[in-house]
Amino acid sequence: MELSEIREKINAVDDQLLDLFMQRMDLAEEVAAYKNKHNQPILNKTREREILAKVMEKAGDREQYAHHLFSTLFELSRSRQAELICAPTHVAAQVKAALANGGELFPQTGLIACQGVEGGNSQVACDRLFPRGNLVYVKTFQAVAAAVESGLCKFGVLPIENSSNGSVRAVYDLLQDHNLSIVRSTRLCIRHELLALPGVKQEDITEIYSHQQAIGQCSKFLNSLSGVRVIPCDNTAAAAKMVAESGSRNAAAISSHPCTALYGLECINGDIQDSDNNYTRFICITKDPVIYAGSNRISLIVSTDNKPGALFDILAKLAALDINMTKLESCPVTGRNFEFIFFLEIEASVQDPKVLAMLQELERNCSGFRYLGSYAEV
């Protein structure tokens, strides 16, 4: 048989498959109406297992492919049912309120909680997000969260991940423990320099101060030094300020170039970071969810039962709607042995009914679910 003849037969089969698929989706809508009327859950795992068992038995040595096909059919069917089910969920109410609280333009000013001191990367991120913002400097990430949660500041800005040194786990812990919402994010290209008092040379240095993330991003340089003590502190700009105020000619700071002028220091080595492609991502948090125009990212915290395929069930829902996942981070649950939650970031808009239906389905089916916000990255 010629290839063209085979393809003609495939086209005929595809036409039949599409007709049967549409019939199946019509029936799924009837199922949704029945479940809606009788207040039944969307997921019926027992029935799905029964169908899969029959399918695999009939499929013979192609049972793996048949299993995948029908698992995808089930996911598509559940996604359609989720759009039609009217059972209220907490996330639906959150999204509705957040949309009502939002607006066309992201604010350009406000009282902003910023960790560190003038000259830090957090300050640069604040200025990018809020060109006319009124910054309130606090010492720790925890203090940023507390300032926002208490209402002292309307917004707070926190670093959440670095392209070279990974996630800022302390910020992920704060998102777990506090009732905060993400409303914006931005990325900064980070350049680290070794700063010291004027006239000091690198061979004079016996102590280097900086934030733990910056230390990690300059690990190769630091490991090449001998007889130098590396001391973590609250912030890269705070490190520069500390060195300037100490008057010590044996101390240096890993900090940013603007801190040279701010604190009267000199750059004694401008090539110390592990990678030139070094970006830190910052998030803007508020106390209550707010969704502004153009928000096309969604952040979630989910937890699942500890069983095979639990995470796949979540990812399959995204795949069924062709949603791109930009982040999946597992974090241990404090106080529990080897139990984890997952931070998910996806590219999607909650104003898409299919996306909102998917979020509601996740809330119904996951053992733990928190909506952290919808936002744009600038």
Image (cartoon, rainbow, N blue to C red):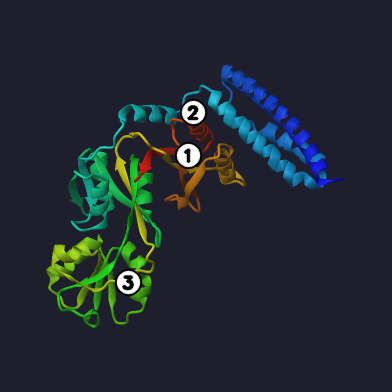
Residue 126 percent location from the top left of the image:
25, 49
Query: On the image, which quarter does residue 132 sit in?
Result: top left
Give me the C-alpha separation between circle 1 and circle 2: 22 Å
Whether residue 48 sits left or right of residue 378 in the image: it is right
> Is any atom of residue 40 visible in this view?
yes
Name of the residue lying farthest toward the right: 1
The residue located at (62%, 18%) in the rendering is 34
Amino acid under label 3? Ile
**Nearer the observer, 154 or 305:** 154
Element type at marker 2?
Answer: helix
**Nearer the observer, 282 or 41:** 282
Is the residue marked by circle 1 packed among few (<14), some (14-19), or many (20+) residues within 10 Å?
Answer: some
Is the residue marked by circle 3 packed among few (<14), some (14-19), or many (20+) residues within 10 Å?
Answer: some
Residue topped by disc 3: 272
The residue located at (20%, 74%) in the rendering is 251
Amino acid under label 2? Pro
N-terminal-most mark, 1 or 2: 2
Give me the C-alpha separation between circle 3 and circle 1: 42 Å
Residue topped by disc 1: 368
Residue topped by disc 2: 353
